[in-house]
Image (spheres, rainbow, N blue to C red):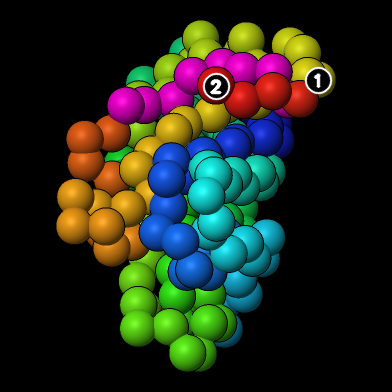
Amino acid sequence: MKQDIIVRIVLQKPTEGVDFGLQKGSGHPYETIQLQQALAQDIRFECSVTVKGDRQKDEKPGFFGPFVQGSPPEKFIYIDIGTYAGQTESIWGRRLKVPLRGITWDTIEEVITSSDLVLETQVPGSGKDGSPACATVKPFGGWKINKLNAYM
């Protein structure tokens, strides 16, 4: 099986005045897209991820594409923050890793049966001290199925 699905990442209460963007590509020649400056509300990012594998042979689905980083079994998506997102005057230069773990074949099959479903996760956009969240999201609440035109 090879199928593209839409994933949505909602950053809850990101640090105001800081730029956030979705990283496309890896290494030095990456590109930051869907650039948004945090104001007083949550921000969200959507991208397409390719799912590969055979349910009969593979315990977990494999994830690929220009937004997918890392190697199995810990694939993830980067959110670029501050200078990493091109905001040269920012005091912040960080990345947030949003893991692609906990997604089952049942979940994938449900999403691909309808063109109006996405996989969505909500993650903190800032730490306890108010600075932008960074590193791997902890604790990670996982992925849920939602409508394309709505978010949790």
Farthest right residue in view: 115
Tell me how far mark 2 sits from mark 1, CA to CA: 18 Å
Left or right of residue 1: residue 121? left
Say which quadrant the N terminus sits in.
top right
Front position in the image: 55 or 110: 110
Provide the secondary structure element on which disc 1 rests: loop
Residue at (46, 31) in percent of width and height: 121
Q: Does the magenta portion include 60?
A: no
Residue 132 vs residue 19: left or right?
Answer: left
Residue at image x 55%, y 21%? 152
- Quadrant hosting residue 52: top right
Residue 64 visible (yes or no): no
Measured as percent of width and height from the top left, residue 2 is found at 67, 33
Q: Which mark is residue 152?
A: 2
Residue at which label 1 appears: 115
Please tell me which residue lies in front, 60 or 30. 30
Point out the stretch of residues depicted in magenta: 141-148
> What is the residue that sits farthest to the bottom in this orientation?
88
Vertical position of residue 60 compared to residue 26: above or below: above
Check if residue 145 falls in the magenta segment: yes
